[in-house]
Image (tube, helix red, strand yellow):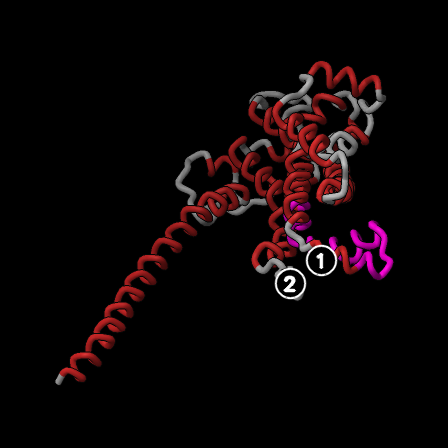
Amino acid sequence: MNDEIALQKPLNHKRKMATEDIIFTIFNTIFLVLFAVVTLYPVLNTLAYSFNEGNDAVRGGIHLLPRRWSLDNYKEILFERPGIRQGFIVTLGRTVLGTFTALAANALLSFILSRKKFLFKSSLSLFWVITMYASGGLIPVLILFRYLHLTSSFWVYIIPGMVSAFNLMVLRTYMEGIPDSLEESAQLEGAGYMRIFWSIITPLCKPVYATIALFVAVYHWNAWFDAMLYNRFDPQFTTLQYELRKLLDSVSASTGQTSGTAVTEAAANTITPITVRAAATIATMAPIIALYPFLQRYFVTGLTIGGVKE
């Protein structure tokens, strides 16, 4: 009898745990579904407005699908505005080149600061941390860039953003977590620091490289203030976001206008500020959304450093 009671208790406990697991799974699934709906609805609603006729969109009531399909919003943005095409080329170039140079510069500096034998490790780390909280101000920076002949040029987008204190600290912290035994083993084989950086550190840092690359790419793709500040009177160096901002301003103030800042006559009756704003938002989001799946696996899986016991 006692043996039967002893066996029944574990069974009851397992049955209770199974019930709790089922309840948790149900509530967790419901929460995640609701969270996905709340997250995706604004994006899908904006997409629906971007493909809807402007005059019809003014009435409202559009949710997930356009009520009256139209491509005039995207035609206005992509084909009727030569500045936007030039801005797209410049933005694409600064995103690719800026991401590569920033990642290379931050990775090399982080590798140096992560070496325990480097004498000025603490001093330089403190120097870059201070730059996160203090700056010279907008006017001194503008004067400095003029003195360095960076204004009215493409390089004003690349050189000032090559080194970021935040990205530097993130990379340095990750590299400090790599076992020193790997570096010592490579040095015993005769490898120098550049060989160690390229053949050992870089493959192990792919997840953090992907993260920093995404951060930098999003920054360059969304940047518009530097174009307005440093290259406002140089159309060949305009950026996509700056042109889209000017477009939204011109569309909002285009009622009854026929100047170059107003919308084109062919689209005057089919687009409105709300639909152009939606199309501009989707055009801005699309490249980054397309890039993210290629970097997602680095965020999800990561790398496990093993094989060497400290």
Judge whether residue 227 can be spotted in this image.
yes
Instruction: Give x and y (percent) for residue 178.
Output: 67, 53
The residue at the point 82 percent across, 24 percent down is 150
The label shown at residue 5 is none
* Bounds of the magenta segment: 186-213
Reply above or below: 212 against 162.
Answer: below
Q: Quadrant of residue 104?
A: top right
- Queried whether the magenta region covers residue 230, the answer comes back as no
Q: Name the kind of residue labelled 2 in the image.
A: Lys
Question: 90 or 118: nearer the eye?
Answer: 118
* Amino acid type at mark 1: Ser
Residue pictured at 80% horizontal, 54% vertical: 196
**Left or right, residue 163 beside residue 155:** left
Which residue, given by chain and number where applicable, does mark 1 sit on? 181
Which disc is residue 309 wearing?
A: 2
Tell me whether the residue at label 1 lies in contact with that at label 2, contact meaning CB atoms closer than 8 angstroms. Answer: yes
Question: Where 166 falls versus 138 (above or below)?
Answer: below
Magenta highlight on residue 201: yes
**Residue depicted at x 24% and y 75%:** 10
Predominant SS of the magenta segment: helix
